[in-house]
Image (cartoon, rainbow, N blue to C red):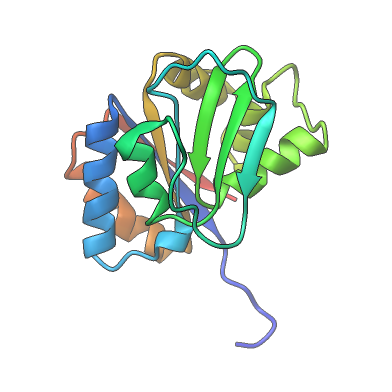
Amino acid sequence: MEGKTERQSALIGTYENHIQAEEVVRALEKSGYDMKKLSIVGKGYHTEEHPMGFYTTGDRMKTWGGIGAFWGGLWGLLFGAAFFWIPGLGPIAVAGPFVQMLVGAAEGATMVGGLSAVGAALVGLGVPKKSVLKYETSLKSDKYLLIAHGTPAEVAKARDIMEQSRVTETEMVAA
């Protein structure tokens, strides 16, 4: 039907480490999941540098010095990449559509009830405020958030794959 867009959803999976997150990204890629609809957020490395932010949004970022093979490999799969220093969270790397949401929250000063820019972007994604604290705590603990964006059918496909992995938990949200 022209003029009618299908409702968008998102699925957030929490992973203990980058190895688990990367395994699921690869499984989603093999299943044919649209990599333009997949985001990852995490730290998992430490740096003494404190940049305010750096991002690219169109094409893929191929390499990014100093952050290791994990992020470098993901930049080759996912579209849009960013690195932010978020007060209270520290250095956060992001790839995929969530970059735009985070940039919008940071640039627009869209802070929601004292949340960080990551928290505000998660609320914008449809995550309930009570869950945002859980995700920010996960990021502080060097865990990874893998976010599948898309129609309810696309997100259900991602959920099937994520739930077969070593995911700590998943949460479905409606954008």
Q: Which residue is drawn at 79% across and 37% down?
A: 107
Percent across and percent down for residue 146 are 39, 40
**Above or below, comparing residue 165 to residue 51 in the picture:** below
Residue at the front extreme, as displayed: 65
Q: Which residue is drawn at 73% across and 36% down?
A: 105
**Above or below, comparing residue 18 to residue 162 in the picture:** above
Q: How many labels does the image show?
A: 0
Residue closer to the observer: 53 or 89: 53
* Quadrant in the rendering for residue 162: top left
Q: Residue at x 55, y 62 (%)?
A: 59
Horizontal side of 130 relative to 110 (left or right) equals left
Horizontal side of 101 relative to 82 (left or right) equals right
Residue 162 visible in rendering: no
Percent across and percent down for residue 173 are 51, 44
* Quadrant in the rendering for residue 7: bottom right
- Where the N terminus falls, by quadrant? bottom right
Horizontal side of 36 relative to 117 (left or right) equals left
Horizontal side of 25 relative to 95 (left or right) equals left
Percent across and percent down for residue 153 are 39, 65
Residue 25 visible in rendering: yes
Residue closer to the observer: 133 or 103: 103
**Above or below, comparing residue 3 to residue 45 in the picture:** below
Residue at the right extreme, as displayed: 108
Residue closer to the observer: 48 or 36: 48
Percent across and percent down for residue 126 are 60, 42
Q: Residue at x 40, y 14 (%)?
A: 141
Residue at the bottom extreme, as displayed: 2
**Above or below, comparing residue 20 to residue 149 in the picture:** above
